[in-house]
Amino acid sequence: MRQMSPKIPAPPDPPRPHTLSIRLSDEEKDDLEATQAMLAKFWKREKVERADVVRAALAMLKAELEATEKGAAVAARK
């Protein structure tokens, strides 16, 4: 599996107005719960919400894809 950037975003400030509902397998649910615990520890909080995990993962994935896209554009120019 590819290593993701270690840059984890800061906790979110205001609540978000949009709702997202998804279905997860048992394994994905377990991964989400484990990630919640790790993120809470990283942010030095007692607990974080599942939505916080999804937001942080989305920010990290977006940053990783943008960096990959920029790297590909630079390589294409050579």
Image (tube, grey):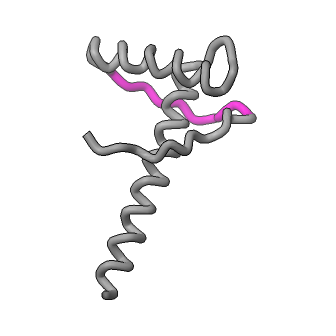
Q: Is residue 73 left or right of residue 19?
A: left
Q: Position of residue 28 (x, y in %)?
A: 32, 20
The quarter in which the C terminus is drawn is: bottom left
Number of numbered discs on residues: 0
Quadrant in the rendering for residue 75: bottom left
Q: Is residue 26 left or right of residue 8?
A: left
Per the picture, the main secondary structure of the magenta-coloured stretch is: loop
Quadrant in the rendering for residue 22: top left
Above or below 74: residue 36: above
The quarter in which the N terminus is drawn is: top left
Above or below 28: residue 59: below
- The magenta-colored residue range is 14-23
Quadrant in the rendering for residue 14: top right
Q: Residue furthest right?
A: 14
Task: Name which residue lies at 46% across and 51% down.
Answer: 62
Q: Is residue 9 left or right of residue 34?
A: right
Task: Name which residue lies at 58% across and 19% down.
Answer: 49
Q: Position of residue 18 (x, y in %)?
A: 57, 35
Task: Name which residue lies at 53% across and 15% down.
Answer: 37
Above or below 68: residue 47: above
Q: Position of residue 71 (x, y in %)?
A: 38, 70
Task: Name which residue lies at 49% across and 31% down.
Answer: 54
Whether 8 is among the magenta residues is no
Q: Nearer the viewer, residue 4 or 63?
A: 4
